[in-house]
Image (cartoon, helix red, strand yellow):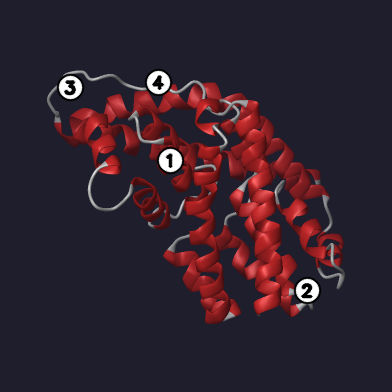
Amino acid sequence: MLIDTLQTFALLLGELLALFLFVSAAVALINRRFGPEKMRDWMASGIVPGPVKGLLLGAVTPFCSCSTLPMLVGMLNAGVGFQTAMTYLISSPLLNPIIVGGIGIIFGWKIAIIYTVFTLAVSLITPMIWTMLGMQTAVKRVRVQGETTPEPWKGLVGELPGALRQAWADLRPLLIPMLLGLAVGAAIYGFVPEDQLTGFAGANIWWAVPLAAVIGIPMYIRLETMLPVGLALQSAGVAIGPIFALMIGGAGASPPEVSMLAAVFKPRLLITFVATILAVAIIGGYLISLTS
């Protein structure tokens, strides 16, 4: 069991480091090619509102919850509005064509449509509520770039070394939180028996959905990889509501993501984020259970 836990830790660490560096470097290249001012202007101008653009960007970037962070930091560094950036943060791990298609194939298209509509609404409404609560003042350690004259674009090959250096600079302050969060997630993965988890989630009682949501949040999972597990749980007799509460909680927030967000969010926004994902998982679980 210890060996499995260490293997899980090493695998998740390698994947997460690769994802973070790749996404950070890609964001740095985008910022160099188009400039933070253009990115900010595109998000803030035009007929389509900024939050809708954040939602669309999240829907077409099938990232796990952790790999959304470098893109989020890049958006905030470019001066993108708080509400737009938070819409992206919520929608990216929960909504993309791969997830929707997988849910439709495995659980049926009625559930896929319900899940999609619910996730769209949550991604747009939640940042509005956070803004009304003044949470935009609870963002820290974000280097908002000023209006400067950028150097000429050197081409992809010429710009890549600088992008990689920027990616490493973005990663360094998050390494310790990332390691701590991954250790917690791997320990839970290695030492919590699957049959115990299935027994809790399959209980036909009112608190099965909230319990599944609470269990899901400490897990580090992607919805794409959780879908086959969800099918196996359903085949074993687990109710559909707890399954989706487990999946939404695990995909929407995880120890590595929360640990890294602590470097960007002040405590009240961090607590609000986790509480929101927990509430969304519970509401989503009950909604899908009642309408399926």
177 lies above or below 278: above
| Chain-order first, disc 3 or disc 2 | 3
Residue denoted by label 2: 238
Name the residue located 62 percent from the left edge and 62 percent from the top edge.
226
Q: The C terminus lies in which quarter of the figure?
A: bottom right
Element under disc 4: loop
Going by the image, does 161 lie left or right of 217? left
The answer to whether the residues at label 3 and label 4 have Cβ atoms under 8 Å apart is: no
The answer to whether the residues at label 4 and label 1 have Cβ atoms under 8 Å apart is: no
Q: Amino acid at mark 2?
A: Val
Residue denoted by label 1: 85
Q: Residues within 10 Å of mark 3 (few under 14, many from 20)?
A: few
- Residue 120 horizontal/vertical position (percent): 48, 60
| Chain-order first, disc 1 or disc 3 | 1
Q: Amino acid at mark 4?
A: Arg
173 lies above or below 35: above
Name the residue located 78 percent from the left edge and 58 percent from the top edge.
210
The CA distance from mark 3 to mark 4 is: 16 Å
- Residue 63 horizontal/vertical position (percent): 47, 50
Residue 160 is at least partly visible in this image: yes
Residue denoted by label 4: 143
Going by the image, does 28 lie left or right of 7? left
Name the residue located 43 percent from the left edge and 22 percent from the top edge.
169
The quadrant in which residue 187 appears is top right
